[in-house]
Image (cartoon, rainbow, N blue to C red):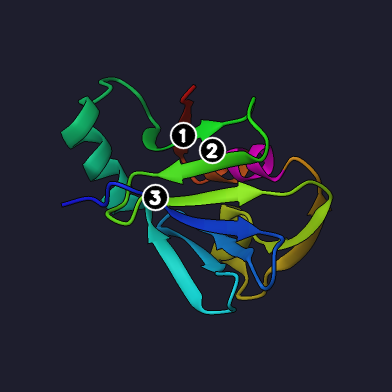
């Protein structure tokens, strides 16, 4: 059974940061610095159970997003309903799916609009998100 209230991780607050986005998972540190991950296959299965499959697509849904609200957020459909909330102008350590396949080292990318960057990294790994208003 899924949680009713999302597990909120504030990216850019304390130790909260995304470490890596791969075809299998999103690895991150929570605000206390604990290493965690979101299993993207679990998210895709939960999406299909709750919303149905999107036939004929190469990409599968794994999360909803709120890019109009402040702070921007991405909420995964895993059991914990992990929601990343993004502060602007913060640094993240992340790796694209291609980087993850070819190297064990993550690269550092600094950007604002972290929810959009995460959306792009997920898309590179063949996952998509949907706007939730």
Main secondary-structure element of the magenta-colored stretch = helix
Residue in the foreground of this view, choosing between 122 and 50: 50
**Magenta extent:** 114-119
Disc 3 and disc 2: Cα gap in Å? Answer: 23 Å
Disc 1 and disc 3: Cα gap in Å? Answer: 19 Å
Left or right, 11 with respect to 30, comes to: right
Q: Mark 3 falls on what kind of element?
A: loop
Q: Which mark is residue 85?
A: none
Q: Is residue 38 magenta?
A: no
User: At 58% from the left edge and 63% from the top edge, which residue is drawn?
Assistant: 20
Residue on which disc 1 sits: 128
User: At 67% from the left edge and 35% from the top edge, which residue is drawn?
Assistant: 70
Measured along the vertical axis of the image, is residue 124 above or below residue 107? above
* Sooner in the amino-acid sequence: mark 2 or mark 1: 2
Q: Which mark is residue 6?
A: 3
Q: Mark 1 falls on what kind of element?
A: strand
User: At 67% from the left edge and 48% from the top edge, which residue is drawn?
Assistant: 86
Asked if disc 1 and disc 3 are in contact, CB closer than 8 Å, the reply is no
Please tell me whether mark 3 or mark 2 is closer to you in this view: 3
* Sooner in the amino-acid sequence: mark 3 or mark 2: 3
User: At 56% from the left edge and 31% from the top edge, which residue is drawn?
Assistant: 66
Residue on which disc 2 sits: 123
Left or right, 30 with respect to 13, comes to: left
Image quadrant assignment for residue 52: top left
Asked if disc 2 and disc 1 are in contact, CB closer than 8 Å, the reply is yes
Q: Residues within 10 Å of mark 1 (few under 14, many from 20)?
A: some
Measured along the vertical axis of the image, is residue 67 above or below residue 3? above
Q: Position of residue 100 (x, y in %)?
A: 57, 64
Q: Is residue 117 magenta?
A: yes
Q: Position of residue 8 (x, y in %)?
A: 49, 55
Disc 2 and disc 1: Cα gap in Å? Answer: 6 Å
* Sooner in the amino-acid sequence: mark 1 or mark 3: 3
């Amino acid at each position: 059974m899924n949680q009713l209230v999302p597990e909120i991780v504030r990216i850019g607050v304390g130790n909260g940061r995304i470490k890596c986005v791969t075809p299998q998972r999103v690895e991150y540190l929570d605000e206390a610095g604990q290493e965690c991950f979101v299993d993207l296959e679990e998210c895709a299965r939960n999406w299909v159970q709750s919303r149905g499959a999107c036939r004929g697509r190469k990409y599968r849904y794994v999360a909803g997003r709120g890019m109009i609200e402040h702070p921007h957020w991405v909420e995964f459909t895993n059991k914990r309903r992990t929601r990343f909330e993004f502060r602007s102008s913060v640094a993240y350590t992340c790796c694209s799916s291609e980087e993850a396949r070819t190297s064990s080292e993550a690269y550092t990318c600094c950007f604002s609009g972290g929810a959009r960057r995460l959306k792009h990294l997920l898309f590179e790994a063949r996952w998509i998100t949907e706007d939730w208003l």
